[in-house]
Amino acid sequence: MDTRTVADTSDQAMDVAIISTGGTFGMQTSARGLTPSPVADRIDALLRSSPIPGLRYTISELTPQIDSANATPAAWQQIVEAIDECYDQFDGFVIVHGTDTMAYSTAAVCYAFAHRDKPIVFTGAQRPLSAPNSDGPANLVGALEHLNVALPGSVDIYFGGSVLSGTRAIKYSTIADRAFLEPARLRGAGVPDAKSRADAPPFIEYADIEIPVIRMYPGISSRLVSAMLDGEVPGAVLQCYGFGNVPAATPGLLDALSRASARGQVIVAVSQCFEGEITLGTSEVSTSLADAGVIDGADMTTEAAVTKLHYLFGTGISSTSVRELAGINLVGELARSR
């Protein structure tokens, strides 16, 4: 369903595509709890009742609307295609999305549109429009207004009055209006320059591959790590302790990582901590990780690392090239490169 309304007929009006993918924002109550529901008419009614000066918009929605907990790389591809199909017609884009996996989808769109120059803003809600205290209206209006000041080519999240980089956000709360935060950085702002964007290979598509996330915890076995790296897995994200520590004394664990790297699998280390970053070589254990071929992911979030590997492998480049680019700041996902 598409609807179009003109809130401002001046020559200076911004033409915006609002694309709803689903999520809590438009959910309705059912016998089994909240469920995704078409929302275009309700968004249109909301914006008609409180027009935003200088805005012309079109509303469209994916069919069917999805609960973002069910989002997959195929859903990222749907969003990319929905934006791409109308890219030349609009000045900016607002994507309504569920909060559970919004950080993955924003990062995926960042990589896919690395060489584009129009702003894209994701938003959603902790409480649906049908709720009397919904945060959805304020988030939608805030996202639309942010387009006026967003940097060209940026992909951001507007939520709870805050603006966050699309490759730096994590979901922080299931209840607070400010649902997303950015992990604290140690070095720089992580803003990509023209050269780093030029390093990003052209996007093709998000293919149906698996990128496992292997979280370190006391008692994890080398058998489990080996199992997660078996088969057709092209790479993985390793959630380490602190600045890059793993239980290296566990028999066979480092060997499992070394064998995977030797097979051409690309393993990127990220930290489980909210503040700080991976710095392989700081300790004997983290030096062993580097020796095993694991890539220093610096301060990348898990979400940015997972989607980055999906993106890089989806471009069709070799695993050697993926390894070279995995630790380089392409779209603001890193404050520093290894």
Image (cartoon, helix red, strand yellow):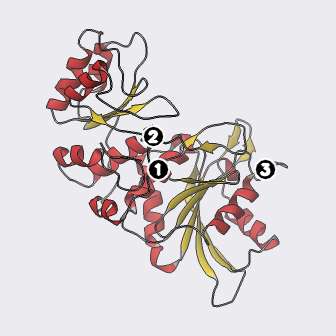
- Indicate the position of residue 27 as horizontal and vertical percent values: 69, 49
The one of 224 and 74 positioned closer to us in this rendering:
224
Q: Position of residue 161 (x, y in %)?
A: 70, 54
Q: Is residue 286 above or below residue 83?
A: above
For residue 293, the mark is none
Q: Residue furthest bottom?
A: 11
Q: Quadrant of residue 211?
A: top left
Point out the residue furthest to the left here: 262
Tell me: residue 159, above or below residue 30: below
Q: Secondary structure at mark 1?
A: loop
Query: Tag 3's secondary structure?
Result: loop
Q: Earlier in the sequence, mark 3 or mark 1?
A: 3
> Looking at the picture, which amino acid does disc 1 mark?
Thr
Residue drawn at the location 72% of the way across and 40% of the way down: 176
- Specify the quadrant of the image occupied by residue 92: bottom right
Give the CA distance from mark 2 to mark 1: 8 Å
Specify whether 16 is left or right of 205. Answer: right
Q: Which mark is residue 167?
A: 1
Q: Which residue is mark 2?
A: 301
Q: Earlier in the sequence, mark 2 or mark 3?
A: 3
Coordinates of residue 86 in the picture (x, y in percent): 48, 74
Q: Amino acid at mark 3?
A: Ser
Q: Are marks 2 and 1 in contact (CB under 8 Å)?
A: yes
**Residue 134 - label:** 3
Q: Amino acid at mark 2?
A: Thr
